Amino acid sequence: MKVNNQEANNTTTEKREPTILHREDWASHDRLWKGYVQGADLGTDVTVLFFVTEQPGEGPRWHVHPYDEIFIVRKGNALFTIGDKKIKATAGDILLGPANIPHKYHNLGPGVLETTDIHLSDRWIQTNLEDPEQSIKLNK
């Protein structure tokens, strides 16, 4: 992609300084990539979540965000449900969860599932929802 440097320079209205957050600032586990960084903490409009689980069937439950989310599968195999679509994903796959579309995913196994989830927002905003698939199971 070709970028016009003059146009790129004109879009920056303030001078920003490099920022660093150390592992102890964001990680919720001492050795696994698990935790999150709010974009507001870095002065940016992107929030990043690091998810990891070794348990098949475990993962974020049915929820929605008012902004797009990008999922990067770093290790393992997952089943994503984004709206009414089910997508099997493996290490190296990248998926888009559009704004206002409920979604979830879980570890298919075998082994660890590791994802990096990029929220296009300066903070993590999430509404947890009742999972329609769980409602169907309960009614059977």
Image (cartoon, rainbow, N blue to C red):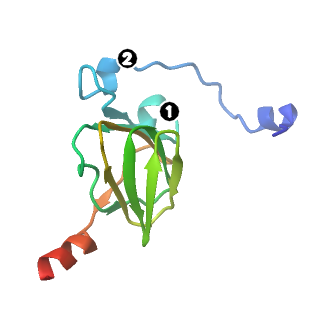
Do tag 1 and tag 2 residues touch (Cβ < 8 Å)?
no
Question: Quick one: 29 or 79, which is closer to the camera?
Answer: 79
Disc 2 secondary structure class:
loop
Give the quarter of the figure containing the N terminus: top right
Q: Where is mark 1, residue-wise?
A: 43
Please name whichever residue, 80 or 21, is drawn nearer the observer in this view of the structure: 80
Residue name at image x 60 percent, y 24 percent = 16
Q: What residue is pinned by disc 2?
A: 22
Residue type of the residue flagged with mark 1: Gly
Tell me where residue 133 sits by quadrant: bottom left
Kindly indicate the quadrant of the structure image that contains residue 127: bottom left
Nearest to the observer: residue 74 or residue 23: 74
Q: Position of residue 87 (x, y in %)?
A: 45, 60
Q: Nearer the viewer, residue 35 or 38?
A: 35
The image shows residue 94 at horizontal and vertical percentages of: 53, 46
What residue do we see at 78% from left, 35% from top? Answer: 8
Question: What is the distance, in whole Å, between disc 1 and disc 2 at their CAs?
Answer: 16 Å
Q: Amino acid at mark 2?
A: His
Q: Is residue 28 left or right of residue 73?
A: left
Q: Residue farthest to the front?
A: 110
Q: Residues within 10 Å of mark 2 (few under 14, many from 20)?
A: few
Who's the residue at 29% across and 19% down the image? 24
